[in-house]
Amino acid sequence: MVNVCMIAPKKYPVPAVKGGAVEGLMELFLTMNERYGRIGLTVLSVWDEKAYASAGEYKKSTIEYIRYGTLRDRLFSSRAVSFLNRMSVRHRGKAVFEDPYIKRAYRKMQGKVFDLVLIEDGEYDIYGYLAKRIPKEKMCIHLHGAYEGAAALSRWFSRYICISNFVARNLLCNGVIHGKKVDVLKNGIDLERFQQELTPEEIVSERKNYGIADETVFVYWGRLIPEKGVKELLEAFKKVRAKKAAKLLIVGSSAFGREVAAEYAMELEALSKDVKGAVCFTGFIPNHELWRAIKIADIAVLPSIWDEAAGLSMLEAMAAGIPLITAKVGGIPEYVEGESAYWVEWSKNFADDLAEAMLKLAGDEELRRGLREHAKENVKAYSAKNYYEQYVRLILSYVKDGEGK
């Protein structure tokens, strides 16, 4: 059996008890490997007590935890140090400071034999420490965001797995990375979780919890950061609210399950004051409970204003059968194909156009039904089983082709 070591980013734990898209995908892979057991899997993750307690559920995989978070550790994660490392890696091919997380990860790997080491995103510039100690043929990276090809990436890794063609093109655009070493693996989700239905009584009860009466309910979920377009959504909702009885649920926080007071989140709260009672900030909701919160909504609005690599929330909306409004940016159109969503093009009038789309969709039941039907078919390709099988197929092909030997 092929033995694989997956290294998680150092910010959030696996299982994804504190959220995180990368960590959620790793948990999904772990869960499917528990069912099918096609590879020997070891996951290295940052320590978290709740995650550690959950890790016992996995019998066919091993999760090793790395203690991280001292004052010295946090210094290595500071913006200043990260910037210095990025610049040094870009221009000199090596980091100024070796990150303690990676050193500890390497110690966890001692005495074990792995056919492949898979880096699950993270700041690639910190992995030079591993590249000095592990043969390049065994080093692969799964890119969950858009990166330009860099000399260090080319020297350190033998294969590159991208979550969309958009990410792959960005990686290849300057000619540093060879296209034959790049594969695209589309994300997957637990479709069954989001396809669950609330009873009419449960919907009434859940809506009552959020103070919702006979109103059209819009919902956003994800991180509360500028790139996600939440501020623009609030501005659009104010225009909608002036014409229609409506409620807006904003599900999420600035840092998933970590309690972090962020300036942007506070700005959003202040912006919503003049529609007090119509906007509800729920805070972070764990992924296994998220479906209940979004199922009470009539329309999902996920208005990313940056070149988002993919976006799991788009898949979740389609699986949940919630008509979706989103922006045609980054890798999103690769996942949300054609008439599976109501598209809003980015422009300086984005908030106005978003408000128009929200009003249009709220007043057109036939349009909503059509979006749901298209989405229902589209999202079938993104099942957890498909994701697992395609990922395992890539892993086995790398080993067969000699990448892991």
Image (cartoon, rainbow, N blue to C red):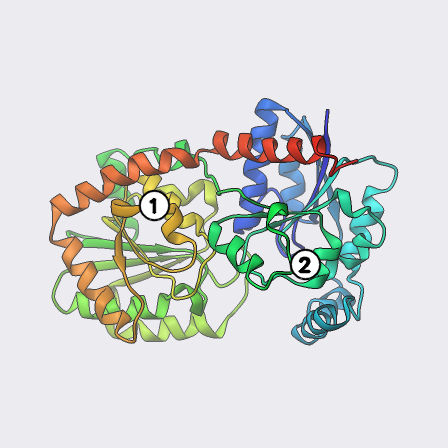
Q: Could you tell me if residue 41 is visible in this image?
A: no
Q: Earlier in the sequence, mark 1 or mark 2?
A: 2
What is the crowding at mark 1: few (fewer than 14 residues within 10 Å), some, or many (at least 20)?
A: many
The label number, if any, that marks residue 344 in the structure image:
none
Q: Nearer the viewer, residue 91 or 273?
A: 91
Residue 269 lies, in percent from the top left, at 37, 71
Q: Amino acid at mark 1?
A: Ala
Q: Which residue is mark 1?
A: 317
Residue 270 lies, in percent from the top left, at 35, 75
Q: Amino acid at mark 2?
A: Tyr
Q: Determine whether 21 is above or below 33 in the image.
A: below
Q: Determine whether 397 is above or below 110 in the image.
A: above
74 with respect to 339 (left or right): right
Q: How far apart, in angstroms, are the residues tagged by discs 1 and 2?
A: 30 Å
Q: Nearer the viewer, residue 311 or 251?
A: 311
- Say which residue appears at 76% left-offset and 66% top-offset: 93
52 with respect to 382 (left or right): right
Residue 154 lies, in percent from the top left, at 70, 56
Q: Nearer the viewer, residue 289 or 380?
A: 380
Q: Residue furthest right?
A: 111
Residue 390 lies, in percent from the top left, at 54, 33
Q: Which residue is mark 2?
A: 124
